[in-house]
Amino acid sequence: MTGTELLSFLAANRHIEMYDDLENHQLCFRNSRLPWYKNHPTGCTAITYARMDGLNDVALMRDINRGLEVEGITRITGYMAKVSSWNPGKLGELKDRRRTDLHGNPAHISIPEINELQAICFAG
């Protein structure tokens, strides 16, 4: 990756912070969106100058994120959809959804509990 490519990468990904560690001949990167970096304020992903020559945008992002950036998906009417492209309103709807089991019961109530309740109600 050339210096120009690195600058355009950083311009396109403003959440990536970079500083130059001249003493150790490496560049240090942090992704401000990931919890690992938030929980480790002095932590960074260090990549040597020599290794930077062989990286492209995708490989650099993979190294910086350390496998921690996971794509959220949801199933809607039988189709899988990435939630990263949703607008804030649609994301809010996703958070407000009520989770139920296949029978329409809240997720915390299991089927045996419901069967026991029915047995009690119909026994009398």
Image: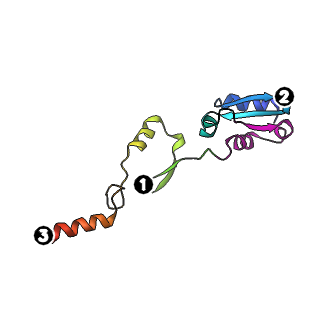
Position in image of residue 79 (x %, y %): 48, 54
Q: Please say if the residues under marks 3 and 1 sit with CB atoms less than 8 Å apart.
A: no
Residue at the image point whose x is 72% and y is 34% from the top:
29
Q: Name the residue under label 3.
A: 124
Amino acid type, residue under disc 3 in the picture: Gly
- At x 49% / y 40%, what residue is drawn? 86
**49 to 73, vertically: above or below:** above
Which residue in the structure is indicated by mark 1? 77
Question: From the viewer's perspective, is residue 78 above or below residue 115?
Answer: above
Q: Is residue 52 magenta?
A: yes
- Please name which of the two marks, 3 or 1, marks the residue nearer to the observer: 3
Residue lying furthest bottom = 123
Q: Which of marks 3 and 1 is nearer the N terminus?
A: 1
Tell me where the magenta segment starts and ends, as one range.
43-67
Crowding at mark 3 (Cα within 10 Å: few <14, some 14-19, many 20+): few
* Helix, strand or loop under label 3: loop
Residue at image position (68%, 34%) is 30
Q: Name the residue under label 2.
A: 22
In the image, what residue type sits under mark 2? Answer: Leu
Which percent across, then down, holds residue 54? 83, 42
Quadrant containing the N terminus in the rendered view = top right
Question: Considering only order in the chain, which callout, 3 or 2, is on the residue closer to the N terminus?
Answer: 2
Going 16% across and 69% down the picture, which residue do you hit?
A: 122
